[in-house]
Image (cartoon, rainbow, N blue to C red):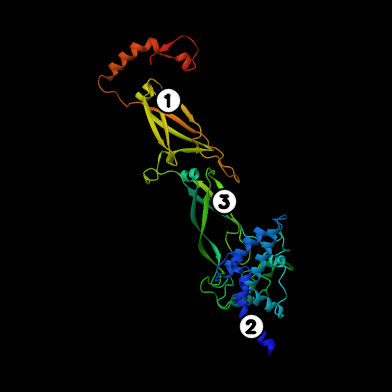
Amino acid sequence: MISRLLFFGLLALLPLLVLAAEDYYKILDVSKDADERQLKKAYRKLSKQYHPDKNPDNPKAHEKFVEVSEAYDVLSDEELRKIYNQYGHEGVAQHKQGGQRGGGRDPFDVFSSFFGGGGHFGRGQRRGPNMEVRVHMPLRDFYVGAEHEFKVEKQAICSACQGSGSKDGVRETCTKCKGQGAILQKHMLAPGIFQQVQMQCDQCGGQRSTVKHACATCKGQRVVRAEEGYELVIERGMPAGVRVNYENEGDESPDFEAGDLVVNVVEKDPELGGDAKTQTDGTFFRRKGPNLFWREVLSLREAWMGGWTRNLTHLDNHIVQLSRPVGTVVQPGTVEIIANEGMPVWQQGESGDLGFGALHVEYMVVLPDQMEKGMGKDFSALWEKWRKKTGVDLGRDSGRPAGGVRDEL
């Protein structure tokens, strides 16, 4: 009688004792109503992150690996999870000591049962193919840095049946292949000569088991097409074409470990007539490595006589001023290089300011399509006046053999 009173008294205290240990749901960073798929996803990520093989000189990582394995071991077991939800850590401990299960499993055994193999990297279960997608970002985001959310449609394990394909969760051993997933067939090549070929079982599709009552959501296929959202961080100066890897976020299947989702970040071409609030001169900069390129158009008067100013609005809206004083000539095709007005210099894994590339400005001169009446006479008189004094030296300026030949302006 006294022992019974002590036992029930201990059960009454269990909800308070749970506060002394870290919550299993917090360890795996999942909600209390997380399904099996979410638990597996969390465990896959954290167990790889803290695995001792990846952190040989980090005892804290080893402790974290043990915690993650213990949390998953309990929450992935339906019976233990119910006990934990009601009575916490002590309830699970009492249950194990009562002979229902032995003491806590070796964390490497948990890892091994999840991934297959011996609990270390390189010998895990079959891995699915990587999935590649392309995300287009404007040049401005590569210049200032940005965070974007994007969605990817992919194959996901059916949450309604937890990947079993069965409405009631029951799968029966295939009667045709006897659970082998394959059958042997004989083919006669010639009289008295036969060839035996192993083929995938056409009754279970190689899955070794069948279902009587197919899941209404996935129609017995165990997987569905679903859209999942991700966050993409564009670092300042990150080159276009960089590949960002999301581990184990590729197509899912109960038969293999998901491959990676590989995102190829490419530069989006600017669109004329787009949103005026977001478009600046910098929107139409061209990029090559850490440098930016721009073409500035000058009239004949500006190129010949100077005395002009241009204000370029950069990608982050700061102003870059171009100008020439009166009397300064700009030849067509001249390239002006402005230091530190290019892209931020980016190096993967490095933080802090690594400097900027340059802005290359190429000048183009636009000539009038035609002359107004009387303009030809005025220009001819002007050129004749200054021809002998300041004419173009063709030998010098065009690369022709020297001969002292001079021509009009």
Disc 3, disc 2: CB below 8 Å? no
Residue 9 circle label = 2
Check the image and report above or below for 378 versus 275: above
Mark earlier in primary sequence (2, 1): 2
Query: Is residue 257 toward the left or the right of residue 226 in the image?
Result: right
Query: Where is residue 114 shown, x and y percent of the image?
Result: 67, 66
Q: Residue furthest bottom?
A: 1
**Residue under numbered circle 3:** 244
User: Residue drawn at (37%, 12%), measured in percent from left and top?
Assistant: 387
Residue flagged by tag 1: what amino acid is it?
Pro
**Residue under numbered circle 1:** 332
Under tag 2, what secondary structure?
Answer: helix
Q: Tag count in the figure?
A: 3
Spatial CA distance of label 2 from label 1 is 93 Å
Residue flagged by tag 2: what amino acid is it?
Gly
Does residue 203 appear in this view?
no
User: Residue drawn at (36%, 24%), measured in percent from left and top?
Assistant: 307
Residue flagged by tag 3: what amino acid is it?
Val
Under tag 3, what secondary structure?
Answer: strand
For residue 364, what is the image quadrant? top left
Disc 1, disc 3: CB below 8 Å? no
Under tag 1, what secondary structure?
Answer: loop
Does residue 242 appear in this view?
yes
Mark earlier in primary sequence (3, 2): 2
